[in-house]
Amino acid sequence: MRVHGDADRRHETTTRCHGHGAVTPWAAAREAARDIGGRCARPEAVRAPLREALGAVLAEDLAALVGVPSYDASAMDGYAVAGPGPWTVVGRVLAGQAPPEELGRSRAVEVATGARVPHGTESVLPYENAERRGDAVHGDAVPGRHVRRAGEDVPSGATVLPAGTAVTPAVLGLAASLAHDALTVRRPRVAALITGDELSRSGFPAPGTVRDAIGPMLPGLAGWAGAALEDPRYVDDTFGAMAAALESAARRPDVSVVVVCGASSTGPADHLRTALAELDVTVVVDGVACRPGHPQLLGHFGPQRAPGPVVVGLPGNPNAALAAALTLLVPVLAALTGRLDPGAAPPRTLPLRDGAGVAPHHRDTRLIAVRADGGHAEPVGHDRPGVLRGAAMADALAVVPPDWTGPAAELLWLPR
Ligand SMILES: Nc1nc2c(c(=O)[nH]1)N[C@H]1C(S)=C(S)[C@@H](COP(=O)(O)OP(=O)(O)OC[C@H]3O[C@@H](n4cnc5c(N)ncnc54)[C@H](O)[C@@H]3O)O[C@H]1N2
Ligand code: MOO
């Protein structure tokens, strides 16, 4: 970390206001994150083509512009038949082709699965139940069988999903079936400020420099929580650069969250807290009693009753940044659109495997990289604050509070 000229006076303030007993317990910090996210203005509703809507939430109920199926269709390859058998075969209809107007009594048309069946069709006789002799077909047809009637799965005009539903791959497929080309969705936008004059962004790091490991993690974390991350802005380790970058991100009406990486501690180049004070940001969580990730921060621009944009400060150590993102950033983003925190998905707890050698810390909640395997959670190791090696092998972070007696531990799932 390099020290810049304008650090000194303001750094005095930082040192006094952080790290002197005001840290928030881990569970309370997460609750605060959910609470702020839930109180912010919802991200603006926008029209998104289907291919861009994945992961957002629906801003409106999803209605069927067309029924499913949209025409009377065969559910099997075989014969559409009308009246009693045997039936005389009068033609063939493949999917996408027009059928004859009307199927007369004791008449059949050979049909492919998905083909339109003629009016008058009473059932479809699958090939395997049919015996063909010349133009005649014999077999036991069961009235109504293997014909999918128009609108029988989804009637035209029906509301099929409520506003607030997360757009999954299945939702996109359904929307297309219902004749939508675009959806009206909400998706929080996240601006990222990455600090650290020692950071490099590509190639082999020169002596004394470090590859940015947080920038590459953030889009996936944001996307997992239904948000979109803008290209990160790399900010010099000066008070002026930090304050200016924060201010300009916060002025953007489309930005719901500003995430700041690094500069969260009390060092001479750590200007986050002083810049937030200068900009009148309300700091709600100033440090969290957890390891790794204790210097993380949660605050907001704007008044208490209408907060926004939210500011999340992630520590510079990459594994601490990941733990902090799961603790504060993901719950804020999920709550902004009212969706469930994906880190808190079931199963919520698993027993740590016997002999895992986990001991609680006397004051802080430990967040331990674990693999979930056969009904147990097993620490994978390699999860010190400065390295993502353990997290990259892990399924979740096991939450071990100071009063933990085991063996069951709460899990905070990682995006996988
Ligand atoms: N006197 C104290 N010093 C520190 C404390 C403390 O309580 N008292 N806490 C330590 C902990 S814990 C953490 S975590 C770090 C947090 O530091 P910052 O958020 O201010 O971040 P930096 O100082 O800039 O960097 C810390 C470390 O991480 C590396 N780094 C930073 N950004 C990135 C990145 N994008 N990708 C990869 N690595 C990054 C940086 O080079 C440093 O090695 O403070 C401790 N100090
Ligand atoms: O808590 Mo630091 O956040 O250990 O790396």
Image (cartoon, rainbow, N blue to C red):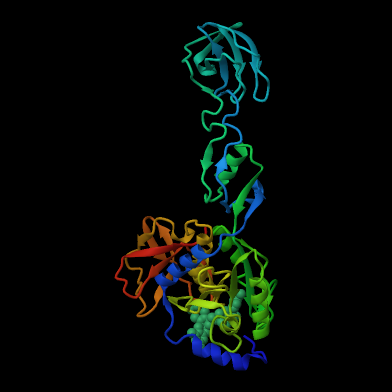
Q: Give left or right: position of 143 versus 74.
A: left
Residue 305 sits above or below residue 68 on the image: below
- Quarter of the image with the N terminus in it: bottom right
Residue 1 sits above or below residue 248 on the image: below
Q: Position of residue 412 (x, y in %)?
A: 44, 63
Snapshot quadrant of residue 43: bottom right
Q: Position of residue 86 (x, y in %)?
A: 53, 5
Q: Give left or right: position of 63 versus 22.
A: right
Snapshot quadrant of residue 372: bottom left
Q: At x 59% / y 44%, what residue is drawn?
A: 172
Q: Position of residue 156 (x, y in %)?
A: 57, 32
Which residue is situated farthest in the left direction here? 405
Can residue 238 be seen from the camera position used here? Answer: no
Number of marks in picture: 0
Q: At x 61% / y 36%, what residue is drawn?
A: 65
Looking at the image, which is closer to me, 121 or 374? 121
Snapshot quadrant of residue 236: bottom right
Q: Position of residue 266 (x, y in %)?
A: 54, 86
Can residue 269 be seen from the camera position used here? Answer: yes
Residue 86 sits above or below residue 405 on the image: above
Q: At x 65% / y 66%, what residue is drawn?
A: 253
